[in-house]
């Protein structure tokens, strides 16, 4: 007994997959990137870096590398 093959109800689009992203699929990663970039550019405003000198040194070195 052969298994039935499933056919598509409509033909596939020619240009590939036709999907649309919701607005938040681009907005949330962009906001997260901007928040992390702001913490890197202004480490004095980040409260967690005040207690760890090693982390603040690392951030300062990263700023120097980015500024070059």
Image: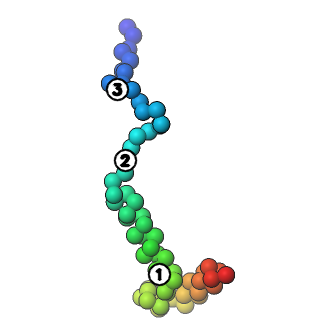
Residue 7 placement (x, y as % from top left): 37, 21
Of callouts 2 and 1, which one flags the residue occurring earlier in the amino acid sequence? 2
**SS class, disc 3:** loop
Quadrant housing residue 34: bottom left
Of callouts 2 and 3, which one flags the residue occurring earlier in the amino acid sequence? 3
> Which of the two residues, 31 or 6, is positioned nearer the viewer here?
31
Residue 14 placement (x, y as % from top left): 46, 32
Residue 62 placement (x, y as % from top left): 60, 81
Q: How are the colours assigned in the image?
A: rainbow
- C-alpha gap between disc 2 and disc 3: 18 Å
Residue located at (62% from left, 82% from top): 67
Q: Residues within 10 Å of mark 2 (few under 14, many from 20)?
A: few
Q: Is residue 23 above or below residue 48?
A: above
Residue located at (48% from left, 37% from top): 15
> Which of the two residues, 52 or 11, is positioned nearer the viewer here?
11
Which dot marks residue 39?
A: 1
Q: Is residue 26 above or below residue 37?
A: above
Q: Is residue 54 visible?
A: no
Quarter of the figure that contains the C terminus: bottom right
Q: Which residue is mark 2?
A: 20
- C-alpha gap between disc 3 and disc 1: 49 Å
Which dot marks residue 10?
A: 3
* Foreground tag (2 vs 1): 2
Residue contact between numbered discs 3 and 1, judged by CB atoms under 8 Å: no
Q: Residues within 10 Å of mark 1 (few under 14, many from 20)?
A: some
Of callouts 3 and 1, which one flags the residue occurring earlier in the amino acid sequence? 3
**SS class, disc 1:** helix
- C-alpha gap between disc 2 and disc 1: 32 Å
């Amino acid at each position: 007994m052969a298994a039935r093959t499933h056919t598509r109800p409509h033909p596939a689009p020619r240009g590939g997959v036709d999907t649309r992203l919701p607005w938040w699929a681009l907005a949330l990663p962009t906001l997260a990137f901007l928040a992390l970039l702001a913490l890197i550019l202004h480490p004095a405003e980040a409260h967690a870096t005040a207690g760890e000198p090693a982390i603040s040194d690392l951030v300062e070195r990263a700023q120097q590398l980015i500024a070059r």
